[in-house]
Image: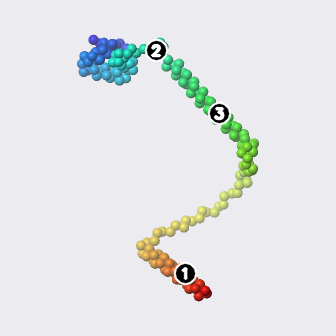
């Protein structure tokens, strides 16, 4: 019994033997591998399992259907591109003529264009130097803390003096 036909597909006897379980292990592996990539044989095998008859269409419909899909896709894409192009041209024309401000109701003057002579030349000044200083060393940290404490103490004393002066005038 031949498992495969000359065109490489499984024979009807090979499919029936696979279904009956009479194939040896090598035959089952070859048939399973072939069924994994051959849709036609898989359809025939499925029809044998379910008892259905798989009908083939009278002609191949993939090309006409593919052409119809391509034509509709191109019509959709070109249609959208045409609408976008017309909208861009219309917006540019309205902007250039100044009628866009009238449509939007803005009374602002239109955008002005400047020539290079009208623009002031850049100043030759150097950019300002950074005010970054090195972080204080651990010895300086204690003096910074002491300075902060002294400043707070002076502030509290000044507030107390003002409070005393305010109570003496009342």
Of the 4 image quadrants, the one containing the C terminus is bottom right
Residue holding disc 2: 57
- Number of the front mark, 3 or 2: 2
- Residue pictured at 47% horizontal, 75% vertical: 144
Can the viewer see residue 95 in this picture? yes
Q: Nearer the viewer, residue 114 or 60?
A: 60
Q: In the depicted view, which residue is nearer to us: 11 or 141?
A: 11
Q: Residue furthest bottom?
A: 168
Among numbered discs 3 and 1, the one appearing first in the sequence: 3
* Residues at marks 3 and 1 touching, judged by CB atoms closer than 8 Å: no
Badge 3 marks a residue whose secondary structure is: helix
Q: Which residue is drawn at the image coordinates 33% and 13% (left, top)?
A: 11
Residue 28 drawn above or below residue 77: above
Q: Is residue 9 visible?
A: no
Q: Is residue 95 left or right of residue 157?
A: right
Q: Which residue is mark 1?
A: 159
Residue positioned 67% across, 38% down in the render: 88
Colour scheme employed for the rendering of this structure: rainbow
Residue at image mark 3: 83
Q: CA distance from mark 3 to mark 1?
A: 74 Å
Gap in Å between the C-alphas at discs 3 and 2? 40 Å
| Above or below 81: residue 51 | above
For marks 3 and 1, give the one nearer the viewer. Answer: 1
**Upstream in the sequence, badge 3 or badge 2?**
2
Q: For residue 127, what is the image quadrant?
A: bottom right
Q: Quadrant of residue 69?
A: top right
């Amino acid at each position: 019994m031949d498992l495969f036909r000359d065109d490489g597909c499984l024979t009807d006897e090979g499919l029936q033997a696979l279904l009956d379980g009479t194939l040896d292990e090598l035959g089952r592996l070859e048939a399973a591998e072939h069924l994994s990539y051959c849709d036609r044989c898989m359809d025939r095998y499925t029809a044998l399992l379910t008892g259905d008859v798989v009908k083939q269409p009278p002609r191949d419909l993939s090309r006409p259907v593919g052409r119809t899909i391509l034509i509709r896709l191109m019509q959709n894409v070109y249609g959208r591109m045409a609408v976008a192009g017309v909208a861009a041209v219309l917006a540019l024309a309205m902007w250039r003529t100044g009628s866009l401000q009238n449509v939007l109701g803005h009374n602002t003057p239109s955008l002005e264009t400047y020539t290079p002579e009208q623009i002031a030349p850049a100043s030759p000044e150097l950019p300002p130097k950074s005010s970054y200083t090195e972080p204080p060393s651990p010895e300086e940290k204690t003096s910074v803390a002491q300075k902060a404490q002294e400043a707070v103490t002076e502030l509290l004393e000044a507030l107390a003096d003002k409070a005393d002066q305010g109570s003496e005038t009342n």
